[in-house]
Amino acid sequence: MLLTREPLSTAPAADPAFCRDIVEGLSRFPKATPPIWFYDQRGSELFEAIADLPEYYPTRTETGLLQRHGPDFAEAIGPGRAVIEFGAGSARKTPHLLRAIDPVAYVPIDISGDFLHASSAALAAAFPGLPVLPLVGDFNADLSLPAAIHGLPRLGFFPGSTIGNLEPAGAVDLLRAMRRLLGEEAMLLIGMDRIKDPARLVSAYDDAAGVTAAFNLNLLTRINRELQGDLPLEAFAHRAVWNDDKARIEMHLEALRPLHFHVAGYCFDMAAGETIHTESSHKYGQRDERLLLRAGGWEPTRQWSDDEGLFSLILASA
Ligand code: AVJ
């Protein structure tokens, strides 16, 4: 679609990276915005509510695996490591892992600072002897680990199938960056969501209660609030579709009528039926997940999944 740009003189400062990503994403055709910006305070809360939905199997399946296989983790990972969690969020799954492997430090990384600090405090209270060193930031960008864990062997913990948000090339880049960040003796425990019946996948991303729709639409609320937007929320509908060629669920926000709106002083148009692609969630088969890890510089050593084969936890070595 055509768009015209009119720089605005007096836009108050928002997160410049948020502004850049959204303006660029809305200027593209098709329109697409990065999913990291879902997670403001409200978005993080809505994701917690998604995790409890009957249709959203990944969180409860992965948590079950972490609960059930503690003795395996103890044997395969062992004590004395610094655990670095990527995208920790509420860190509800973490206690199961920490209890099993007896680490010497825990570094949760998350983009949502308030959320991270609250969950870090709760975790520190539950594990009194364990140094908890939260890091606010985007793990897709360059990060440096706290000096306090220098020299310690590391375990990267990347649960939730967050890796699935990235296109394969980006996923490989991220795995390589983690390999560099975590060092030579590192291990990685990563969750990936499996390819399965498309109807089951779609319902996990388009729940009956409308929580995922609210999560998707909250991005527009955030844009309106933080980037002086005037997107009409009632003119957008949540869509979740299975892209079979790319083996991924896509979330979109579809314009229900022709729209003209503004964000950060720029003008945008959408035709009726046009969408903003807000998230991709890639799913992997059993061989795909090993191939992805190897392409990213990690050698898979163990793998756990549930009886239905819905979700997979994989341990890999540097
Ligand atoms: C947190 C990225 C793993 O892709 O399943 C849930 C986010 N989006 N419902 C996912 C999400 C819509 C979730 N991840």
Image (cartoon, grey):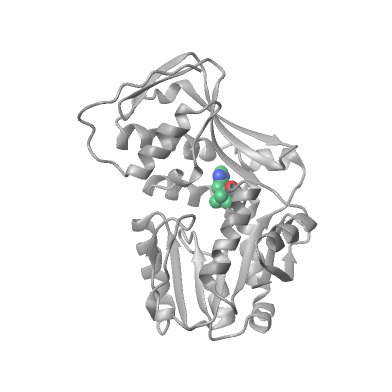
Quadrant in which residue 105 is drawn: bottom left
Q: Is residue 125 above or below residue 274?
A: below
Q: Is residue 254 left or right of residue 106?
A: right
Residue displayed at 43% across by 49% down: 45
Q: Which residue is at 51% across, 40% downward?
A: 211
Q: In the picture, which quadrant includes the C terminus?
A: bottom right
Give the percent coordinates (x, y) of residue 149: 43, 80
Which of the two residues, 155 or 125, is positioned nearer the viewer here?
155
Where, by quadrant of the figure, is residue 117 drawn? Answer: bottom left
* Residue 152 horizontal/vertical position (percent): 49, 83
- 175 or 164: which is nearer to us? 175
The answer to whether one can see residue 271 in this image is: yes
Nearest the viewer among 189 and 72 is 189
- Looking at the image, which residue is at 55% across and 65% down? 178
Q: How many marks?
A: 0
| In the rendered image, the vertical position of residue 276 relative to residue 148, given as above or below | above
State the residue at coordinates (53%, 15%).
Answer: 272
Q: Is residue 308 visible?
A: no
Residue 157 at x, y = what percent?
A: 56, 67
Q: In the displayed structure, does residue 177 sit left or right of residue 248?
A: left
* For residue 79, side relative to residue 131 (left or right): right
* Residue 280 pos. (x, y %): 60, 41
